[in-house]
Amino acid sequence: MVRLIAFLVGLFFSGMLLLGLGDTVITAIKEPAVPSVEAEFHEEPLPVTFAHDGPLGKYDRGQLQRGLKVYSEVCAACHSLKLVAFRDFAALGYSEEQVKALAKAWKTEVPSINPETGEPATRPAIPADKIPSPFANEVAARAANNNALPPDLSLITKAREGGPAYVYSLLLGYRDQAGYKNEDGKELLKEFPEAATPAGLHFNPWFANLNIAMAAPIVSDDQVTYDDGTKATKAQMAEDVSAFLTWAAEPKMENRKSAGWAALGFLLVFTVLAWMSYKTIWADKKH
Amino acid sequence: MSTVKKTKSTAKKPAVKKAAVKKAAAAPVAAQVTASDNGHHGAEGSGVRRRDFIHIAAVSFAGVGAAAVAMPLVSQMSASADVLALASIEVDVAAIQPGQAIKTSWRKQPVFIRNLTPAEIEEANKVDVGSLRDPQTLADRTKPGKENWLITLGVCTHLGCVPLGAAAGEVKGEYGGYFCPCHGSHYDTAARIRKGPAPLNLAVPEFAFISDTVVKIG
Amino acid sequence: MSFPWAQEYKPQGTVSKWVDERLPLPRLVYNAVGAGYPVPRNLNYFWNFGVLAGVALVIQIVTGIVLAMHYYASVDGAFNSVEHIMRDVNSGWFVRYAHMNGASFFFIVVYIHIFRGLFYGSYKAPREMIWLLGVTIFLLMMATAFMGYVLPWGQMSFWGAQVITGFFSAIPLVGEPLRQLLLGGFAPDQAALNRFFSLHYLLPFVIAGVIILHIWALHIPGSSNPTGVSVKSEQDTVPFHPYYTAKDGFGLGIFLIFFVAVTFFAPNMLGHPDNYIPANPLSTPAHIVPEWYFLPFYAILKAFTVDFGIPFTGIILIPAKLMGVLAMFGSILLLFFLPWLDTSPVRSGHYRPLFRKFFWYGLIPCIVILTYCGGKPPYTQWVVLSQIAAAYYFAHFLIILPIVSRIERPLPLPNSITEAVTGKPLPAAA
């Protein structure tokens, strides 16, 4: 009885799937899928390497400090970094005093209340504070950005496929759409005339739908003056800020990797010992 | 941990022998009795041999590994980085008039900052330190040149209630300092215990004046 | 316990005797995983995965309890509390990554454990009850994993909750009210998050309870083995301790090496970037997929594209959406009937030439294809592939297996486990 019912159920499910298969194939032939502009023109991240890549990689402190400078002078005007606190900057190689000074000098102050009147006010940041956001709330952020919401950058390298390479590519990926061709030599506006970038958006083939609300943030060399004398080329700034944002998203990466090596080494020894123990115990048993 | 290891490794030895002896034996039940006896005595007598050493090493390694993993699982309970970041605060005391006190919060505990009047200082200095339960002078409890600034935790040393006396109009107790209503401890103008069950003076946190009017606590 | 030659627990010393007379717990352990449990001597490494699954559950419970000390189930605070664990709590990143990847490794281990059971016929008499309890554990695991994935309240958490509770809305009449009952609202929100947290904490202990039943049921007939031949004499077995404790110790080392390598060096490899974006009820990610261990079932769900109705009348009896949901649940529930679908008296796939062909060239590739297609966007080629694979999946269990077990001529079985191992027949004395 079980087998009879099972047979009928199996016949039903498999039959419906095969009917569906026929339907899918017929539909695909009758109405072939239209190639989308994203599928043809969206670019994979540019090749870029960082000091923190790989299982032995460590952050380059100098690069992180430069990246912080790019973030604070370029990105921070619109993008928050809510999950990072000033005290965390000690990990970039800053002393306690420098962290304090950084917090105090931060362009945006921390929302607070006037201790006398109770009115909303602001105060300079202290190391314990999280980085203050440039906009009070989402409505204010949208109002100031043509109804687009600049995403928080605390986790951006973990929240996007490609991570730091994506951020790097996006920052350098602004192109002139007129006459833009992909690697196959196809010209975008000829293939997809309706895909012209709408007013207020910016063409960037590294962005998911090719049209991003953010205007190119890194526009010229020496936009930022580095304290360590590094030449601030556009690529350098993009690379530095990508490294900084990787740190912001994964501040414990170095602890993680070093703990990982210790754990792996320990387990290797344990496994060898366990294997020897296993072989000794089974030595007199054929199996 | 060590006792666990020992019992495990000793338990292993006789079992190995039992199995070995048993294989040769024709009658399993009889073999078992002799095997367990032999095995037991054999393990006691022959000392640590190579094969035993391997088992002991493997089990010890497992024990060490378990202990190593337990460390982060326990340490996660201690104060996290954001809690520690608030471990020091800076307070501007410019607005506190002589005779007044404020309550502030440090490490989620109340702190009393009191600007003593000359009369209160004099009263505190008059006391014979030797007669106190927790002998300390006012100078021990304040910073040189800033003897009028008495900064203490607002936590009664008896069982942790918050004493009265910091806010205007509160009962200051029989000695004009602080009074804990929970079990009736009286503190004097230097916040020293004078009467009641509390064993110690109100604790003075680590603090320093980083400018004339700003004090850093912690 | 199960065999007359099982070694008996003999308490040494007065304390052990005193305990044994009052609460024979050491005796229970001795008989369950000690020298008192005789196990076939020929188990291969596939038999390590039961113990490993237990270890994986312990890892999840221990790290989970720790995480719950810092997590708060609030739609405004959940995401930040997870990041607080990752950034500020001492070793919090380790505990969280271990829990996150521990879930994946739990499923890897359990899938291998199930694969072992399928190939070696471990579900057959007299072990049907072990199998039924095992499938129950698997269902509980899936529920627990789903609710756990919702807790960080990222984009995938939110939309996963939305989609999976959406399954229930496919049920006629009661569907929508049922979904509202499950969510405590019209969409996933505070009420849903709180109850998911509560149940996510509860279910692992229910799983632990069912595992005890699973092991209890195992100890009635004893473990099966790669030949599928029943244990006949003492020579066929070895005591669990030290033989299999040592082997499991080695297996554990290998398992932990893989686990540590992923947890410490590629902790986000098995996750999805979108879950690092806080939940936004107003915007769905471009491409939502469940965690990898649900992908085959997700592919089955998506493979049903046509309504079932009476031809040429336009009357629809079962819409495609409902059928997908039924099939998805059916694909797991059919495992409950497996012991009665595969009627071949031979357990091990080694001695079943026809079964083996369908298993290796049919079932396994189809499950791989379903896993792969489950993560792909609904383009024609992936839909076609998953439709073929899903059709075979159902046909394999419900049609092919019963027929194969009837017509197949199995290879000759060894007379005993010892003979299979040593190549020599058992001595007449034994």
Image (cartoon, helix red, strand yellow):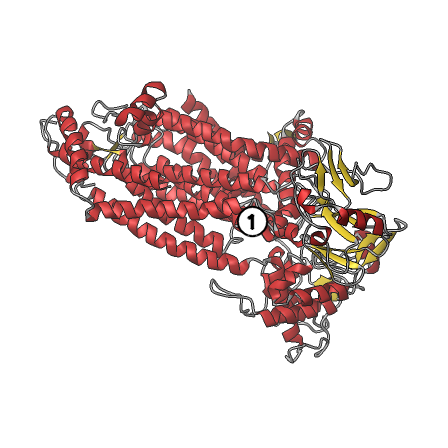
Residue A167 position, x and y percent, is: 64, 64
Q: Chain of mark 1?
A: C
In percent of the image, x 68 and y 60: which residue is there?
Answer: A86
Q: Element under label 1?
A: helix
Residue B76 position, x and y percent, is: 55, 46
Instruction: State whether residue A106 is above or below residue C228.
Output: below
Q: Which residue is mark 1?
A: C92
Answer left or right for C219 relative to C276. Answer: left
In percent of the image, x 16 and y 28: which residue is there?
Answer: B32
Q: Amino acid at mark 1?
A: Gly
Answer left or right for B76 relative to B149. Answer: left
Q: Most extreme residue toward the right, as rendered?
A: A117
Mark 1 surroundings: few (<14), some (14-19) or many (≥20) residues within 10 A: many
Count every numbered label the image shows and give the total: 1
Q: Quadrant of the N terminus of chain C?
A: top left
Instruction: State whether residue A51 is above or below residue C351.
Output: below
Q: Nearer the viewer, residue C339 or C400?
A: C339
In percent of the image, x 74 and y 69: which residue is there?
Answer: A73
Answer left or right for B182 relative to C157. Answer: right
Query: Is residue C118 visible to us here?
Result: yes
Q: Quadrant of residue B1?
A: top left
Q: Quadrant of the C terminus of chain C?
A: top left
Query: Is residue A7 visible to us here?
Result: no
Q: Nearer the viewer, residue A185 or C120?
A: C120
Residue C71 position, x and y percent, is: 62, 42
Residue B216 position, x and y percent, is: 73, 57
Q: Quadrant of residue C324?
A: top right
Q: Nearer the viewer, residue B211 or A143?
A: B211
Answer left or right for C275 relative to A141. Answer: left
Q: Quadrant of residue C149?
A: top right
